[in-house]
Protein backbone atom coordinates (compact mmCIF):
# COMPACT_ATOMS: atom_id res chain seq x y z
CA UNK A 1 0.00 0.00 0.00
CA UNK A 2 2.81 2.43 0.85
CA UNK A 3 4.03 2.71 -2.73
CA UNK A 4 0.59 3.94 -3.79
CA UNK A 5 0.69 6.87 -1.40
CA UNK A 6 1.93 10.39 -2.00
CA UNK A 7 4.84 10.06 0.41
CA UNK A 8 7.59 11.26 -1.93
CA UNK A 9 5.96 14.67 -2.32
CA UNK A 10 5.76 14.99 1.46
CA UNK A 11 9.36 14.02 2.17
CA UNK A 12 10.91 16.46 4.62
CA UNK A 13 7.57 18.06 5.46
CA UNK A 14 5.95 18.18 8.90
CA UNK A 15 2.67 16.32 9.37
CA UNK A 16 0.86 16.89 12.67
CA UNK A 17 -1.45 14.03 13.66
CA UNK A 18 -4.05 14.29 16.40
CA UNK A 19 -4.59 10.79 17.79
CA UNK A 20 -7.93 10.33 19.53
CA UNK A 21 -11.28 8.62 19.56
CA UNK A 22 -11.91 4.88 19.48
CA UNK A 23 -8.43 4.21 18.11
CA UNK A 24 -7.03 5.15 21.51
CA UNK A 25 -8.85 2.36 23.36
CA UNK A 26 -8.68 -0.41 20.74
CA UNK A 27 -5.44 -2.36 21.01
CA UNK A 28 -5.31 -3.37 17.33
CA UNK A 29 -5.94 0.19 16.15
CA UNK A 30 -3.28 1.54 18.50
CA UNK A 31 -0.81 -0.93 17.04
CA UNK A 32 -1.60 -0.05 13.43
CA UNK A 33 -1.43 3.67 14.25
CA UNK A 34 2.06 3.23 15.69
CA UNK A 35 3.09 1.30 12.57
CA UNK A 36 1.69 4.07 10.33
CA UNK A 37 3.68 6.72 12.20
CA UNK A 38 6.92 4.75 11.83
CA UNK A 39 6.22 4.13 8.14
CA UNK A 40 5.81 7.88 7.60
CA UNK A 41 9.05 8.62 9.45
CA UNK A 42 11.02 6.01 7.51
CA UNK A 43 9.62 7.43 4.28
CA UNK A 44 11.17 10.79 5.09
CA UNK A 45 8.15 12.63 6.50
CA UNK A 46 8.32 14.42 9.85
CA UNK A 47 5.32 13.23 11.89
CA UNK A 48 4.39 14.93 15.16
CA UNK A 49 1.71 13.27 17.29
CA UNK A 50 -0.64 15.16 19.63
CA UNK A 51 -2.83 12.79 21.62
CA UNK A 52 -6.07 13.09 23.50
CA UNK A 53 -7.19 10.89 26.36
CA UNK A 54 -10.79 11.72 27.18
CA UNK A 55 -12.04 8.15 27.77
CA UNK A 56 -9.05 7.30 29.95
CA UNK A 57 -9.46 10.50 31.99
CA UNK A 58 -13.18 9.87 32.49
CA UNK A 59 -12.53 6.27 33.57
CA UNK A 60 -9.96 7.40 36.15
CA UNK A 61 -12.25 10.13 37.47
CA UNK A 62 -15.03 7.60 37.95
CA UNK A 63 -12.64 5.27 39.79
CA UNK A 64 -11.72 8.15 42.10
CA UNK A 65 -15.40 9.15 42.51
CA UNK A 66 -14.79 12.58 40.99
CA UNK A 67 -17.39 14.37 38.88
CA UNK A 68 -17.32 13.94 35.09
CA UNK A 69 -18.98 17.00 33.61
CA UNK A 70 -18.85 18.82 30.26
CA UNK A 71 -19.99 22.24 29.08
CA UNK A 72 -20.01 23.19 25.39
CA UNK A 73 -18.04 20.02 24.62
CA UNK A 74 -15.24 20.90 27.07
CA UNK A 75 -14.43 19.04 30.28
CA UNK A 76 -15.07 21.09 33.41
CA UNK A 77 -11.65 20.95 35.07
CA UNK A 78 -11.41 21.60 38.79
CA UNK A 79 -7.95 21.53 40.46
CA UNK A 80 -8.64 17.91 41.50
CA UNK A 81 -9.60 16.99 37.95
CA UNK A 82 -6.51 18.78 36.61
CA UNK A 83 -4.29 16.53 38.74
CA UNK A 84 -5.94 13.50 37.14
CA UNK A 85 -5.67 14.99 33.64
CA UNK A 86 -1.91 15.48 33.98
CA UNK A 87 -1.41 12.06 35.52
CA UNK A 88 -3.38 10.23 32.84
CA UNK A 89 -2.18 12.17 29.79
CA UNK A 90 1.54 12.36 30.53
CA UNK A 91 1.88 9.39 32.86
CA UNK A 92 -0.21 6.77 31.11
CA UNK A 93 -1.54 7.59 27.64
CA UNK A 94 1.64 9.22 26.40
CA UNK A 95 3.90 6.52 27.82
CA UNK A 96 1.86 3.76 26.19
CA UNK A 97 1.91 5.50 22.80
CA UNK A 98 5.63 6.17 23.01
CA UNK A 99 6.17 2.51 23.80
CA UNK A 100 4.06 1.31 20.87
CA UNK A 101 5.97 3.49 18.40
CA UNK A 102 9.33 2.54 19.86
CA UNK A 103 8.55 -1.14 19.43
CA UNK A 104 9.46 -0.48 15.79
CA UNK A 105 12.63 1.53 16.46
CA UNK A 106 14.05 4.31 18.66
CA UNK A 107 11.83 7.06 17.35
CA UNK A 108 9.29 8.43 19.83
CA UNK A 109 10.02 10.96 22.57
CA UNK A 110 7.25 12.17 24.86
CA UNK A 111 6.73 15.73 26.06
CA UNK A 112 3.87 17.93 27.12
CA UNK A 113 3.01 21.50 26.29
CA UNK A 114 4.51 22.42 29.65
CA UNK A 115 7.99 21.20 28.68
CA UNK A 116 10.40 23.99 27.65
CA UNK A 117 7.37 26.34 27.47
CA UNK A 118 6.33 24.62 24.25
CA UNK A 119 2.78 25.91 24.72
CA UNK A 120 1.55 28.85 26.74
CA UNK A 121 -2.13 29.12 27.59
CA UNK A 122 -4.68 31.42 29.13
CA UNK A 123 -7.86 30.42 30.89
CA UNK A 124 -10.83 30.16 28.57
CA UNK A 125 -14.54 30.55 29.14
CA UNK A 126 -17.23 28.40 27.56
CA UNK A 127 -20.37 29.92 26.12
CA UNK A 128 -23.70 28.14 26.53
CA UNK A 129 -26.84 29.70 25.03
CA UNK A 130 -25.03 33.01 24.77
CA UNK A 131 -23.98 33.03 28.42
CA UNK A 132 -20.44 32.60 29.82
CA UNK A 133 -19.85 29.44 31.85
CA UNK A 134 -16.88 28.82 34.15
CA UNK A 135 -15.24 25.52 33.13
CA UNK A 136 -12.30 25.72 35.49
CA UNK A 137 -8.71 25.08 34.48
CA UNK A 138 -9.34 24.77 30.74
CA UNK A 139 -6.93 26.74 28.62
CA UNK A 140 -6.60 28.32 25.21
CA UNK A 141 -3.18 28.18 23.55
CA UNK A 142 -1.90 31.71 22.95
CA UNK A 143 1.73 30.99 22.11
CA UNK A 144 3.76 28.04 20.81
CA UNK A 145 7.54 27.77 21.03
CA UNK A 146 8.35 24.95 18.58
CA UNK A 147 12.12 24.84 19.21
CA UNK A 148 12.10 21.64 21.29
CA UNK A 149 9.83 19.85 18.81
CA UNK A 150 12.00 20.98 15.89
CA UNK A 151 15.14 19.80 17.68
CA UNK A 152 13.60 16.35 18.12
CA UNK A 153 12.60 16.22 14.45
CA UNK A 154 16.16 17.12 13.45
CA UNK A 155 17.35 14.15 15.51
CA UNK A 156 15.03 11.80 13.56
CA UNK A 157 12.65 11.48 16.50
CA UNK A 158 8.87 11.46 16.59
CA UNK A 159 7.58 13.95 19.21
CA UNK A 160 4.50 12.70 21.09
CA UNK A 161 2.86 15.70 22.75
CA UNK A 162 0.34 15.78 25.61
CA UNK A 163 -2.12 18.72 25.47
CA UNK A 164 -1.31 20.30 28.82
CA UNK A 165 0.11 23.82 29.03
CA UNK A 166 1.21 26.34 31.62
CA UNK A 167 0.05 29.94 31.68
CA UNK A 168 2.06 33.06 32.35
CA UNK A 169 0.35 33.00 35.77
CA UNK A 170 2.05 29.67 36.55
CA UNK A 171 -1.23 27.76 36.44
CA UNK A 172 -1.39 24.50 34.47
CA UNK A 173 -4.30 24.16 32.04
CA UNK A 174 -6.12 21.35 30.29
CA UNK A 175 -6.07 22.02 26.53
CA UNK A 176 -8.43 20.55 23.97
CA UNK A 177 -6.23 18.18 21.93
CA UNK A 178 -7.76 19.22 18.59
CA UNK A 179 -6.92 22.88 19.18
CA UNK A 180 -3.50 22.04 20.60
CA UNK A 181 -2.69 20.05 17.45
CA UNK A 182 -3.85 22.93 15.26
CA UNK A 183 -1.72 25.46 17.14
CA UNK A 184 1.34 23.23 16.92
CA UNK A 185 0.77 22.60 13.20
CA UNK A 186 0.75 26.35 12.57
CA UNK A 187 3.90 26.94 14.60
CA UNK A 188 5.73 24.15 12.74
CA UNK A 189 4.56 25.35 9.30
CA UNK A 190 3.10 21.88 8.75
CA UNK A 191 2.10 20.55 5.36
CA UNK A 192 -0.86 18.67 6.81
CA UNK A 193 -2.94 18.49 9.98
CA UNK A 194 -4.62 15.10 10.39
CA UNK A 195 -7.29 14.48 13.02
CA UNK A 196 -8.43 10.95 13.80
CA UNK A 197 -11.93 10.69 15.21
CA UNK A 198 -14.87 8.27 15.58
CA UNK A 199 -16.83 9.25 12.46
CA UNK A 200 -16.10 9.16 8.73
CA UNK A 201 -15.72 12.92 8.57
CA UNK A 202 -18.00 15.95 8.46
CA UNK A 203 -21.60 15.10 7.53
CA UNK A 204 -23.46 17.55 5.33
CA UNK A 205 -26.71 17.57 7.33
CA UNK A 206 -26.18 15.69 10.57
CA UNK A 207 -28.19 14.07 12.16
CA UNK A 208 -30.64 13.97 9.25
CA UNK A 209 -28.12 12.64 6.74
CA UNK A 210 -24.82 10.78 6.66
CA UNK A 211 -23.78 12.30 3.35
CA UNK A 212 -20.07 13.01 3.74
CA UNK A 213 -18.51 16.37 2.90
CA UNK A 214 -15.35 15.39 1.04
CA UNK A 215 -13.82 18.83 0.58
CA UNK A 216 -14.59 22.16 2.21
CA UNK A 217 -12.96 25.59 2.35
CA UNK A 218 -12.19 27.70 5.40
CA UNK A 219 -14.96 30.19 4.59
CA UNK A 220 -17.49 27.39 4.28
CA UNK A 221 -16.44 25.95 7.65
CA UNK A 222 -16.73 29.32 9.35
CA UNK A 223 -20.36 29.55 8.30
CA UNK A 224 -21.07 26.03 9.63
CA UNK A 225 -19.40 26.36 13.05
CA UNK A 226 -22.48 27.63 14.97
CA UNK A 227 -24.48 24.61 13.78
CA UNK A 228 -21.95 21.85 14.55
CA UNK A 229 -22.36 19.28 17.30
CA UNK A 230 -20.10 19.76 20.32
CA UNK A 231 -17.84 16.83 19.41
CA UNK A 232 -17.14 18.04 15.87
CA UNK A 233 -16.91 21.73 16.76
CA UNK A 234 -13.32 21.82 18.13
CA UNK A 235 -12.08 19.62 15.27
CA UNK A 236 -13.47 21.85 12.56
CA UNK A 237 -12.48 24.96 14.52
CA UNK A 238 -8.94 23.58 14.70
CA UNK A 239 -8.89 22.83 10.99
CA UNK A 240 -10.17 26.33 10.22
CA UNK A 241 -7.51 27.96 12.38
CA UNK A 242 -4.78 25.82 10.86
CA UNK A 243 -5.49 26.43 7.17
CA UNK A 244 -6.18 30.12 7.78
CA UNK A 245 -2.72 30.41 9.36
CA UNK A 246 -0.77 28.64 6.63
CA UNK A 247 -1.16 24.86 7.00
CA UNK A 248 -1.65 23.55 3.45
CA UNK A 249 -4.53 21.18 4.24
CA UNK A 250 -6.32 19.58 7.19
CA UNK A 251 -8.08 16.22 7.26
CA UNK A 252 -10.76 14.65 9.45
CA UNK A 253 -10.32 10.86 9.21
CA UNK A 254 -12.12 7.85 10.66
CA UNK A 255 -9.73 6.48 13.26
CA UNK A 256 -11.76 3.28 13.50
CA UNK A 257 -10.36 2.23 10.12
CA UNK A 258 -6.96 0.47 10.25
CA UNK A 259 -4.14 2.45 8.61
CA UNK A 260 -6.33 5.57 8.43
CA UNK A 261 -3.29 7.78 8.91
CA UNK A 262 -1.49 6.37 5.89
CA UNK A 263 -4.64 6.54 3.79
CA UNK A 264 -4.85 10.24 4.59
CA UNK A 265 -1.57 10.78 2.73
CA UNK A 266 -2.97 9.87 -0.68
CA UNK A 267 -2.23 12.10 -3.64
CA UNK A 268 -5.79 11.92 -4.89
CA UNK A 269 -8.96 12.30 -2.86
CA UNK A 270 -8.16 11.40 0.73
CA UNK A 271 -10.80 9.58 2.79
CA UNK A 272 -12.88 11.59 5.23
CA UNK A 273 -13.15 15.37 4.97
CA UNK A 274 -10.38 17.58 3.60
CA UNK A 275 -10.23 21.23 4.64
CA UNK A 276 -8.40 23.62 2.31
CA UNK A 277 -7.63 27.36 2.39
CA UNK A 278 -9.94 29.70 0.55
CA UNK A 279 -9.15 30.12 -3.12
CA UNK A 280 -6.41 32.67 -3.61
CA UNK A 281 -5.51 32.85 0.10
CA UNK A 282 -2.13 31.13 -0.41
CA UNK A 283 0.45 31.97 -3.05
CA UNK A 284 1.38 29.19 -5.43
Image: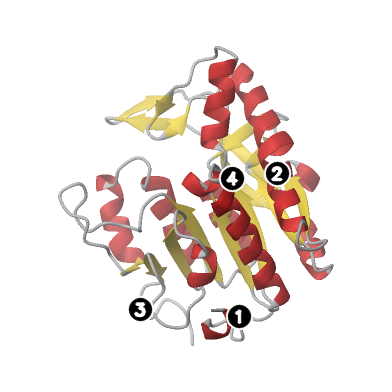
Residue 248 image point, x, y percent:
50, 73
Residue 113, located in which quarter of the rendered image?
Answer: top right
| Comes first in the chain, label 4 or label 1 | 1
Residue 56 image point, x, y percent:
57, 32
Mark 4 lies on a secondary structure that is strand
For discs 1 and 3, the disc positioned in front in the rendered view: 1
Question: In front: 2, or 181?
Answer: 2
Write down the residue under mark 3: 279
Query: Label 2 vs label 3: CA separation?
Result: 41 Å
Write down the residue under mark 1: 10
- Residue drawn at (68%, 48%), measured in percent from left and top? 97
Which mark identifies residue 96? Answer: 2
Q: How crowded is mark 1: few (under 14 residues within 10 Å), some or many (20 or more)?
A: some
| Comes first in the chain, label 2 or label 3 | 2
Query: Label 4 vs label 1: CA separation?
Result: 27 Å
The reply to whether residue 113 is visible in this rendering is: no
Query: Label 2 vs label 4: CA separation?
Result: 25 Å
- Residue drawn at (41%, 31%), measured in percent from left and top? 126
Residue 213, located in which quarter of the rendered image?
Answer: bottom left
Write down the residue under mark 4: 141
Q: In this view, does 8 lie above or below 79?
A: below
Q: How is the image coloured?
A: secondary structure
Amino acid sequence: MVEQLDLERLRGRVVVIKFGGHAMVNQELKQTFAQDVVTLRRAGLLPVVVHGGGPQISAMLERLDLDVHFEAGLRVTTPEVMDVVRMVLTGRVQRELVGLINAHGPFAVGLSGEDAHTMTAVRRTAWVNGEPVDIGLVGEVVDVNPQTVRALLEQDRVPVVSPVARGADGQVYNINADLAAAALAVALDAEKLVMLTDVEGLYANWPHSTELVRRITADEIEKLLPELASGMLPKMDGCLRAVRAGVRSAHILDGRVPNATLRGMTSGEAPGTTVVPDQGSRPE
